[in-house]
Protein backbone atom coordinates (compact mmCIF):
# COMPACT_ATOMS: atom_id res chain seq x y z
CA UNK A 1 0.00 0.00 0.00
CA UNK A 2 1.48 3.36 -1.07
CA UNK A 3 0.56 5.28 2.08
CA UNK A 4 2.38 8.52 2.81
CA UNK A 5 3.69 9.62 6.18
CA UNK A 6 0.65 11.87 6.56
CA UNK A 7 -1.63 8.84 6.31
CA UNK A 8 -3.00 9.39 2.82
CA UNK A 9 -3.23 6.20 0.73
CA UNK A 10 -1.92 7.23 -2.67
CA UNK A 11 -3.09 3.96 -4.25
CA UNK A 12 -6.66 5.30 -4.32
CA UNK A 13 -5.74 8.67 -5.85
CA UNK A 14 -6.29 9.16 -9.58
CA UNK A 15 -3.35 11.58 -9.78
CA UNK A 16 -1.08 8.73 -8.76
CA UNK A 17 -2.69 6.34 -11.24
CA UNK A 18 -2.27 8.89 -14.02
CA UNK A 19 1.38 9.40 -13.17
CA UNK A 20 0.99 13.04 -12.12
CA UNK A 21 2.08 12.38 -8.55
CA UNK A 22 3.93 9.67 -6.64
CA UNK A 23 3.54 8.54 -3.07
CA UNK A 24 5.76 10.05 -0.41
CA UNK A 25 5.95 6.69 1.34
CA UNK A 26 6.41 6.15 5.08
CA UNK A 27 8.81 8.53 6.80
CA UNK A 28 11.61 6.00 7.28
CA UNK A 29 11.55 4.76 3.69
CA UNK A 30 13.89 5.46 0.79
CA UNK A 31 10.81 6.66 -1.09
CA UNK A 32 10.33 9.44 1.46
CA UNK A 33 13.96 10.55 1.15
CA UNK A 34 13.66 10.65 -2.65
CA UNK A 35 10.36 12.53 -2.51
CA UNK A 36 11.75 15.10 -0.07
CA UNK A 37 14.81 15.70 -2.24
CA UNK A 38 12.59 16.11 -5.31
CA UNK A 39 10.39 18.65 -3.51
CA UNK A 40 13.44 20.64 -2.46
CA UNK A 41 14.75 20.65 -6.03
CA UNK A 42 11.46 21.63 -7.68
CA UNK A 43 9.71 23.71 -5.01
CA UNK A 44 12.68 24.94 -3.01
CA UNK A 45 11.34 23.35 0.20
CA UNK A 46 9.99 19.95 1.27
CA UNK A 47 6.57 19.13 2.70
CA UNK A 48 6.79 20.02 6.41
CA UNK A 49 4.89 16.88 7.38
CA UNK A 50 7.08 14.54 5.37
CA UNK A 51 10.31 16.19 6.48
CA UNK A 52 9.27 16.06 10.15
CA UNK A 53 8.45 12.36 9.84
CA UNK A 54 11.79 11.69 8.16
CA UNK A 55 13.84 13.59 10.73
CA UNK A 56 12.02 11.96 13.65
CA UNK A 57 12.17 8.47 12.14
CA UNK A 58 8.38 8.09 12.11
CA UNK A 59 6.67 6.05 9.41
CA UNK A 60 3.07 7.24 9.73
CA UNK A 61 2.09 10.34 11.69
CA UNK A 62 -1.48 9.25 12.62
CA UNK A 63 -0.23 5.87 13.87
CA UNK A 64 3.23 6.51 15.24
CA UNK A 65 3.50 10.11 16.43
CA UNK A 66 2.23 11.08 19.89
CA UNK A 67 2.05 14.75 18.77
CA UNK A 68 -0.43 14.09 15.98
CA UNK A 69 -2.29 16.22 14.98
CA UNK A 70 0.41 18.87 15.31
CA UNK A 71 0.93 22.37 13.85
CA UNK A 72 2.33 20.89 10.65
CA UNK A 73 -1.20 19.68 9.94
CA UNK A 74 -3.30 22.47 11.44
CA UNK A 75 -1.43 25.31 9.70
CA UNK A 76 -1.29 23.57 6.34
CA UNK A 77 -3.94 23.31 3.64
CA UNK A 78 -2.94 19.69 3.13
CA UNK A 79 -3.95 16.95 3.62
CA UNK A 80 -6.74 17.19 6.26
CA UNK A 81 -9.47 19.63 7.21
CA UNK A 82 -10.11 21.33 10.57
CA UNK A 83 -13.03 19.13 11.60
CA UNK A 84 -11.05 15.96 10.96
CA UNK A 85 -8.10 17.17 13.04
CA UNK A 86 -10.37 18.25 15.90
CA UNK A 87 -12.00 14.81 15.87
CA UNK A 88 -8.57 13.15 15.98
CA UNK A 89 -7.43 15.26 18.94
CA UNK A 90 -10.69 14.67 20.82
CA UNK A 91 -10.87 10.91 20.38
CA UNK A 92 -7.19 10.32 21.14
CA UNK A 93 -7.84 11.50 24.70
CA UNK A 94 -10.89 9.33 25.36
CA UNK A 95 -9.08 6.22 26.54
CA UNK A 96 -9.68 2.72 25.20
CA UNK A 97 -13.20 1.70 24.11
CA UNK A 98 -15.43 0.90 27.07
CA UNK A 99 -16.42 -2.59 25.91
CA UNK A 100 -15.80 -6.20 26.92
CA UNK A 101 -14.42 -8.88 24.53
CA UNK A 102 -17.92 -9.38 23.10
CA UNK A 103 -18.24 -5.66 22.33
CA UNK A 104 -20.79 -5.01 25.11
CA UNK A 105 -20.55 -1.75 27.11
CA UNK A 106 -18.96 -2.25 30.53
CA UNK A 107 -20.86 -1.05 33.57
CA UNK A 108 -19.23 -0.55 36.98
CA UNK A 109 -21.36 -2.29 39.66
CA UNK A 110 -21.95 -0.02 42.66
CA UNK A 111 -21.14 -3.01 44.87
CA UNK A 112 -17.48 -2.76 43.86
CA UNK A 113 -17.22 0.73 45.32
CA UNK A 114 -19.23 -0.43 48.36
CA UNK A 115 -16.80 -3.29 48.97
CA UNK A 116 -13.71 -1.09 48.65
CA UNK A 117 -15.25 1.56 50.91
CA UNK A 118 -15.70 -1.03 53.65
CA UNK A 119 -12.03 -2.04 53.66
CA UNK A 120 -9.33 -0.49 55.81
CA UNK A 121 -7.01 1.47 53.54
CA UNK A 122 -3.84 0.69 55.59
CA UNK A 123 -4.50 -3.06 55.34
CA UNK A 124 -5.07 -2.86 51.57
CA UNK A 125 -1.93 -0.74 51.18
CA UNK A 126 0.04 -3.36 53.12
CA UNK A 127 -1.24 -6.25 50.97
CA UNK A 128 -0.51 -4.42 47.70
CA UNK A 129 2.51 -2.31 48.73
CA UNK A 130 0.54 0.78 47.76
CA UNK A 131 0.96 4.24 49.31
CA UNK A 132 -1.53 6.12 51.47
CA UNK A 133 -2.06 9.75 50.46
CA UNK A 134 -1.44 11.77 53.62
CA UNK A 135 -3.83 14.56 52.70
CA UNK A 136 -6.85 12.35 51.96
CA UNK A 137 -6.09 8.99 53.57
CA UNK A 138 -6.87 7.29 50.25
CA UNK A 139 -4.83 4.76 48.29
CA UNK A 140 -2.31 6.23 45.87
CA UNK A 141 -0.29 4.26 43.33
CA UNK A 142 1.52 4.50 39.99
CA UNK A 143 -0.37 3.08 37.04
CA UNK A 144 2.50 2.80 34.55
CA UNK A 145 3.87 6.38 34.48
CA UNK A 146 0.82 8.12 35.95
CA UNK A 147 0.07 8.71 39.63
CA UNK A 148 -3.49 7.65 40.49
CA UNK A 149 -5.58 8.37 43.59
CA UNK A 150 -8.47 6.04 44.50
CA UNK A 151 -11.27 8.20 45.94
CA UNK A 152 -14.00 5.95 47.49
CA UNK A 153 -16.01 8.81 49.10
CA UNK A 154 -16.55 10.37 45.65
CA UNK A 155 -16.47 7.01 43.82
CA UNK A 156 -13.92 8.05 41.26
CA UNK A 157 -10.27 7.85 40.29
CA UNK A 158 -8.05 10.91 40.11
CA UNK A 159 -4.78 11.54 38.30
CA UNK A 160 -1.98 13.79 39.53
CA UNK A 161 -1.70 16.84 37.29
CA UNK A 162 -0.20 20.32 37.38
CA UNK A 163 -3.15 21.59 39.41
CA UNK A 164 -3.52 18.72 41.85
CA UNK A 165 -5.74 15.65 41.65
CA UNK A 166 -8.02 15.74 38.61
CA UNK A 167 -10.87 13.27 37.84
CA UNK A 168 -9.64 10.42 35.62
CA UNK A 169 -12.44 8.55 33.91
CA UNK A 170 -11.33 5.36 32.14
CA UNK A 171 -13.83 2.60 32.78
CA UNK A 172 -11.43 -0.30 32.20
CA UNK A 173 -9.02 1.16 34.73
CA UNK A 174 -11.77 1.84 37.27
CA UNK A 175 -13.04 -1.74 36.97
CA UNK A 176 -9.54 -3.20 37.41
CA UNK A 177 -8.66 -0.90 40.32
CA UNK A 178 -11.85 -1.74 42.20
CA UNK A 179 -11.43 -5.46 41.75
CA UNK A 180 -7.74 -5.47 42.65
CA UNK A 181 -7.95 -3.33 45.79
CA UNK A 182 -11.26 -4.88 46.81
CA UNK A 183 -10.07 -8.46 46.33
CA UNK A 184 -6.46 -8.88 47.51
CA UNK A 185 -6.46 -10.04 51.14
CA UNK A 186 -2.84 -11.01 51.64
CA UNK A 187 0.65 -10.27 50.33
CA UNK A 188 0.87 -12.57 47.31
CA UNK A 189 4.31 -14.07 46.59
CA UNK A 190 5.94 -13.10 43.30
CA UNK A 191 8.50 -14.76 41.08
CA UNK A 192 7.54 -18.40 41.53
CA UNK A 193 6.25 -19.00 38.00
CA UNK A 194 5.88 -16.99 34.80
CA UNK A 195 2.85 -17.93 32.67
CA UNK A 196 1.06 -16.99 29.48
CA UNK A 197 -2.71 -16.63 29.09
CA UNK A 198 -3.00 -20.29 28.02
CA UNK A 199 -1.50 -21.36 31.35
CA UNK A 200 -4.05 -19.56 33.54
CA UNK A 201 -6.90 -21.40 35.22
CA UNK A 202 -9.42 -19.40 33.15
CA UNK A 203 -7.47 -19.81 29.90
CA UNK A 204 -10.70 -20.36 27.95
CA UNK A 205 -11.62 -16.70 28.56
CA UNK A 206 -8.61 -15.57 26.53
CA UNK A 207 -9.51 -17.51 23.39
CA UNK A 208 -11.71 -16.32 20.52
CA UNK A 209 -12.89 -12.77 21.12
CA UNK A 210 -11.01 -12.69 24.43
CA UNK A 211 -7.60 -13.01 22.78
CA UNK A 212 -5.23 -10.17 23.54
CA UNK A 213 -4.90 -7.79 20.60
CA UNK A 214 -1.22 -8.07 19.76
CA UNK A 215 -1.88 -7.42 16.06
CA UNK A 216 -2.02 -3.66 16.61
CA UNK A 217 1.22 -3.76 18.61
CA UNK A 218 2.89 -5.72 15.81
CA UNK A 219 1.67 -3.21 13.21
CA UNK A 220 3.23 -0.43 15.27
CA UNK A 221 6.41 -2.06 16.60
CA UNK A 222 6.98 -5.28 14.63
CA UNK A 223 9.84 -3.72 12.66
CA UNK A 224 10.78 -1.08 15.24
CA UNK A 225 12.45 -2.83 18.19
CA UNK A 226 14.07 0.40 19.38
CA UNK A 227 10.69 2.10 19.49
CA UNK A 228 9.23 -0.86 21.36
CA UNK A 229 11.97 -0.71 23.98
CA UNK A 230 11.68 3.09 24.25
CA UNK A 231 7.94 3.10 24.87
CA UNK A 232 8.42 0.42 27.52
CA UNK A 233 10.91 2.70 29.30
CA UNK A 234 8.54 5.64 28.92
CA UNK A 235 5.85 3.72 30.80
CA UNK A 236 8.24 2.91 33.63
CA UNK A 237 9.23 -0.52 32.35
CA UNK A 238 12.46 -2.38 32.97
CA UNK A 239 14.32 -4.47 30.34
CA UNK A 240 13.83 -8.22 30.55
CA UNK A 241 16.24 -10.85 29.17
CA UNK A 242 13.71 -12.60 26.92
CA UNK A 243 12.82 -12.56 23.23
CA UNK A 244 14.69 -10.13 20.97
CA UNK A 245 13.35 -7.13 22.90
CA UNK A 246 11.41 -7.43 26.14
CA UNK A 247 10.42 -5.37 29.16
CA UNK A 248 8.48 -5.69 32.39
CA UNK A 249 5.91 -3.05 33.29
CA UNK A 250 3.94 -2.61 36.52
CA UNK A 251 0.39 -1.27 36.08
CA UNK A 252 0.07 -1.94 39.84
CA UNK A 253 2.97 -2.21 42.31
CA UNK A 254 2.71 -6.01 42.58
CA UNK A 255 1.25 -6.88 39.17
CA UNK A 256 4.10 -7.30 36.66
CA UNK A 257 3.30 -7.84 32.98
CA UNK A 258 5.98 -8.89 30.50
CA UNK A 259 5.98 -7.90 26.83
CA UNK A 260 8.25 -9.89 24.51
CA UNK A 261 8.98 -9.03 20.87
CA UNK A 262 10.51 -11.55 18.49
CA UNK A 263 11.69 -9.96 15.27
CA UNK A 264 10.69 -11.56 11.99
CA UNK A 265 12.96 -13.49 9.66
CA UNK A 266 12.67 -14.96 6.19
CA UNK A 267 10.75 -17.91 7.62
CA UNK A 268 8.77 -16.42 10.49
CA UNK A 269 6.86 -13.15 10.93
CA UNK A 270 7.46 -11.01 14.03
CA UNK A 271 5.36 -11.82 17.08
CA UNK A 272 4.62 -10.40 20.50
CA UNK A 273 3.92 -12.45 23.62
CA UNK A 274 2.40 -11.25 26.90
CA UNK A 275 3.33 -13.05 30.12
CA UNK A 276 2.35 -12.76 33.78
CA UNK A 277 3.42 -13.80 37.23
CA UNK A 278 1.24 -16.73 38.33
CA UNK A 279 -0.11 -14.64 41.23
CA UNK A 280 -2.18 -12.52 38.85
CA UNK A 281 -4.96 -15.11 38.71
CA UNK A 282 -5.38 -14.80 42.49
CA UNK A 283 -5.34 -11.02 42.43
CA UNK A 284 -7.67 -10.53 39.44
CA UNK A 285 -10.48 -12.33 37.66
CA UNK A 286 -10.14 -13.22 33.97
CA UNK A 287 -12.25 -10.21 32.84
CA UNK A 288 -10.07 -7.90 34.94
CA UNK A 289 -6.88 -9.42 33.51
CA UNK A 290 -8.26 -8.86 30.00
CA UNK A 291 -9.15 -5.26 30.92
CA UNK A 292 -5.69 -4.64 32.37
CA UNK A 293 -3.87 -5.98 29.30
CA UNK A 294 -6.18 -3.96 27.03
CA UNK A 295 -5.26 -0.85 29.03
CA UNK A 296 -1.53 -1.55 28.83
CA UNK A 297 -1.77 -2.21 25.09
CA UNK A 298 -3.61 1.08 24.68
CA UNK A 299 -0.88 3.08 26.41
CA UNK A 300 1.86 1.26 24.53
CA UNK A 301 0.13 2.17 21.25
CA UNK A 302 -0.25 5.80 22.35
CA UNK A 303 3.51 5.96 22.60
CA UNK A 304 4.86 9.08 24.23
CA UNK A 305 1.59 11.02 24.45
Image (cartoon, rainbow, N blue to C red):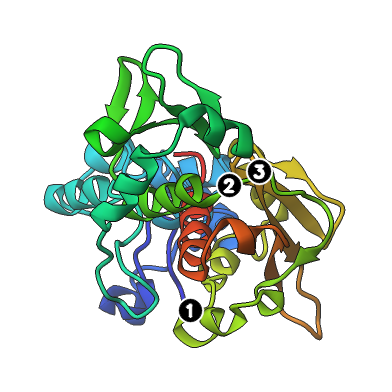
For this rendering, which residue is in front, 121 or 252? 121
Q: Residue at x 52, y 80 (%)?
A: 205
Distance, label 3 to label 1, CA atoms, is: 24 Å
Q: Nearer the viewer, mark 2 or mark 3?
A: 2
Label 1 near label 2: C-beta < 8 Å?
no
Q: Residues within 10 Å of mark 3 (few under 14, many from 20)?
A: some
Task: Note whether 14 is above or below 112 in the view shown.
Answer: below
**Residue 78 visible in the current orientation:** no
Using residue 123 as the reference point, say whether residue 117 is left or right of it.
left
Tag of residue 254:
3
Q: How many marks?
A: 3
Label 1 near label 3: C-beta < 8 Å?
no
Question: Which residue in the structure is indicated by mark 2?
Answer: 185
* Of the image marks 2 and 1, the number of the one nearer the N terminus: 2
Distance, label 2 to label 3, CA atoms, is: 13 Å
Distance, label 2 to label 1, CA atoms, is: 27 Å
**For the view shown, which residue lies furthest in the right direction?**
241
Q: Residues within 10 Å of mark 1 (few under 14, many from 20)?
A: some
Q: Residues within 10 Å of mark 2 (few under 14, many from 20)?
A: some
Q: Residue 77 appears at what percent x and percent y?
A: 20, 46
Q: Residue 130 appears at what percent x and percent y?
A: 57, 31
Q: Nearer the viewer, mark 3 or mark 1?
A: 3
Q: Residue at x 50, y 52 (%)?
A: 183
Task: Note whether 13 is above or below 275 in the view shown.
Answer: below
Task: Note whether 104 is above or below 59 in the view shown.
Answer: below
Question: Which residue in the structure is indicated by mark 1?
Answer: 210
Amino acid sequence: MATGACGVNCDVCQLNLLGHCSSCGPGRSDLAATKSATQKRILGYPCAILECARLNHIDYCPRDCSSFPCDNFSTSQYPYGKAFLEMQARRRNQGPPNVDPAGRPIQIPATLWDRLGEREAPAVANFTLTDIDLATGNLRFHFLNQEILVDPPNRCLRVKGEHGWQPFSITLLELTVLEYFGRVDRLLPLGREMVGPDDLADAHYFSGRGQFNTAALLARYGDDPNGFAAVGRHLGGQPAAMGDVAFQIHPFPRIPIYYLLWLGSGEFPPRISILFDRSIETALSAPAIWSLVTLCNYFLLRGFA
